């Protein structure tokens, strides 16, 4: 069973499963999901807790001993296991062995990072999904973030006008942890309700945060204004231009290859499968190719090459200017601008 964090409270009304796997890239929602599972378990007599990290130094035998031991003070216990970004064969085998030893007085709380499709097809992930619910905790997109912040304001006894709510989502995109802290502070100020845009701008310091991968989808969707905002924020956060050049080069190469396959008469889905494009990204890339003909892709490649050349000359400012021009070049019906 696959659950999302907002579905967890209702699920728990039917009782605890023997194992939960909470994974994803949103730290606050992940922490809250695990805390809810711990509280529910404690209310049902799981008073003892052991925590392990499944890194290379993990003593798996010690973990197994803890999972089978009965304490003098507690008959039921929680074993928490944090998984790394990648599991080697030994860790995968031992994890599956651990899952086979579940019993009613043991609750396994396993956490991990965001997983790609290949990892979700692995034997260890399938074993986890068969043993208990998997809880996917992903960073909310802008629309989901607005709804999420509105609910959190309501839970804190606050309301916000629509423009104020959207400004709050804009100010904390990618940083829900900071947003939750600001909402707690707002609740203590006894401000007039509903909160206005002017009030929030006076009381709240924006703390948005992006990772480099979040630049790609807005560009492919033609949402250039959003992409430019992300690009400027990434620079402020100290992301290296070279990293962005690498990611953009890989994305443009994929688009070029898909375009070549299509021009040769190959169906899109067949071409995408040959290039190992994840099925979840195929609609996005297919739509992008409808907006980006071969000539435009070639011009975008020229801009990227100029950014790479600027980096080779240790001209970081010029590289960022080329990257900004590259983003603008993704506009529909907008020929890419070649800077002097």
Image (cartoon, rainbow, N blue to C red):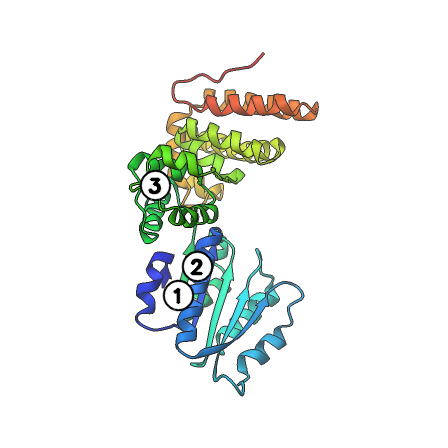
SS of the residue under disc 3: helix
Tell me if mark 3 has few (under 14), some (14-19) or many (20+) residues whose alpha carbon lies within 10 angstroms of its own.
few
Q: Of 58 and 14, which appears nearest the observer?
A: 14
Image x and y of residue 88, in percent: 60, 61
Which percent across, then down, holds residue 34? Answer: 45, 63
Image quarter where the C terminus lies is top right
Q: Is residue 261 above or below residue 143?
A: above
Q: Where is residue 277 in the image (x, y as percent from the top left)?
A: 46, 42
What residue appears at the point 54 percent right and 78 percent down from the top-left corner?
Answer: 67
Residue carrying label 1: 133
Quarter location, residue 38: bottom left
Q: Which residue does the numbered mark 2 point to in the structure image?
A: 32
Mark linked to residue 143: 3
Residue found at the far top of this picture: 340
Q: Can residue 4 be seen in this view?
A: no
142 vs 98, left or right, is: left
Q: What element carries label 2?
A: helix
Q: Are the residues flagged by discs 2 and 1 in contact, CB closer than 8 Å?
A: no
Q: Which of 147 and 168 is in front in this view?
A: 168
Kindly report the distance in space between the C-alpha atoms of the residues bearing marks 1 and 3.
26 Å
Q: Is residue 60 above or below residue 308?
A: below
Q: Which of marks 2 and 1 is nearer the N terminus?
A: 2
Q: Which residue extends farthest bottom?
A: 72
Is residue 37 visible to us here? yes
Judge whether 109 appears above or below 240 on screen.
below
């Amino acid at each position: 069973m696959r659950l999302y964090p907002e579905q967890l409270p209702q699920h728990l009304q039917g009782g605890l499963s023997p194992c939960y796997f909470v994974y994803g890239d949103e730290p606050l929602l992940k922490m809250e999901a695990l805390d809810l599972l711990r509280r529910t378990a404690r209310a049902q007599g799981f008073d003892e807790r052991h925590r392990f990290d499944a890194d290379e130094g993990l003593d798996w035998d010690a973990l197994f001993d803890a999972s089978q031991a009965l304490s003098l003070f507690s008959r039921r216990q929680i074993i928490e296991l944090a998984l790394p970004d990648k599991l080697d064969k030994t860790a995968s085998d031992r994890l599956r062995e651990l899952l086979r030893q579940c019993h009613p007085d043991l609750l396994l709380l396993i956490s991990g990072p965001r997983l790609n499709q290949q990892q979700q097809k692995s034997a260890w992930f399938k074993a986890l999904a068969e043993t208990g619910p998997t809880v996917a905790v992903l960073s909310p997109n802008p629309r989901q973030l607005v709804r999420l912040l509105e609910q959190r304001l309501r839970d804190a006894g606050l309301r916000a006008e629509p423009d104020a709510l959207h400004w709050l989502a804009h100010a904390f995109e990618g940083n829900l942890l900071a947003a939750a802290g600001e909402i707690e502070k707002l609740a203590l100020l006894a401000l007039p309700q509903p909160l206005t845009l002017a009030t929030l701008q006076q009381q709240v310091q924006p703390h948005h945060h992006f990772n480099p991968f979040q630049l790609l989808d807005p560009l492919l969707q033609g949402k250039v204004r959003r992409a430019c905002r992300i690009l400027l924020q990434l620079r402020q956060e100290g992301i290296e231009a070279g990293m962005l050049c690498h990611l953009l080069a890989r994305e443009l190469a994929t688009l070029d290859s898909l375009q070549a396959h299509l021009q040769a008469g190959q169906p899109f889905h067949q071409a995408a499968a040959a290039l190992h494009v994840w099925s979840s990204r195929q609609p996005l890339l297919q739509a992008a190719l409808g907006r980006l003909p071969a000539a435009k892709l070639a011009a975008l490649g020229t801009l990227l090459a100029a950014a790479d050349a600027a980096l080779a000359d240790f001209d970081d400012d010029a590289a960022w200017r080329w990257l900004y021009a590259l983003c603008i070049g993704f506009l529909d019906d907008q020929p890419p601008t070649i800077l002097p």
